[in-house]
Image (cartoon, grey):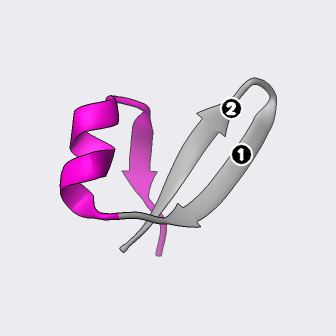
Amino acid sequence: MIYRFIHGDIILRIIVDEDKCTACGNCKEICP
């Protein structure tokens, strides 16, 4: 799945495992 991460002022769109996204706590939303 593709998630949008906020890194400083940069929005990073990366493909990650859903569990990892949940664990990191930095996932803002799932990108369409």
Return the residue nearer the eye: 6 or 16: 16
Q: Which residue is mark 2?
A: 7
Q: Which SS class for mark 2? A: strand
In the rendered image, residue 3, in percent from the top left (x then y), is placed at 46, 59
Q: Which residue lies at the image location 43% right of the left edge and 40% below the top edge?
A: 28
Relative side of 27 to 9, left or right: left
Q: CA distance from mark 1 to mark 2?
A: 6 Å
Return the residue nearer the eye: 5 or 16: 16
Return the residue nearer the eye: 9 or 17: 17
Most extreme residue toward the top, as rendered? 8
In the rendered image, residue 15, in percent from the top left (x then y), is placed at 48, 70
Q: Which residue lies at the image location 40% right of the left edge and 64% below the top edge?
A: 16
Q: Amino acid at mark 1?
A: Ile
Q: Which SS class for mark 1? A: strand
Give yes or no for contact between labels 1 and 2 (Cβ–Cβ under 8 Å): yes
**Which of the labelled discs sits on residue 11, or is there none?**
1
Q: Is residue 22 magenta?
A: yes
Relative side of 19 to 25, left or right: left
Relative side of 16 to 15, left or right: left
**Which of the labelled discs sits on residue 30, or is there none?**
none
Is 31 drawn above or below residue 8 in the view shown?
A: below
Q: Amino acid at mark 2?
A: His
The residues colored magenta run 17-32
Mark 2, other Cα within 10 Å: few <14 / some 14–19 / many ≥20: few
Q: How many marks?
A: 2
Mark 1, other Cα within 10 Å: few <14 / some 14–19 / many ≥20: few
The answer to which image quadrant residue 18 occupies is bottom left
Most extreme residue toward the left, as rendered? 19
Return the residue nearer the eye: 17 or 30: 17
Q: Which residue lies at the image location 71% right of the left edge and 45% below the top edge?
A: 11
Q: Is residue 26 magenta?
A: yes
> In which quadrant of the rendered image does the N terminus lie?
bottom left
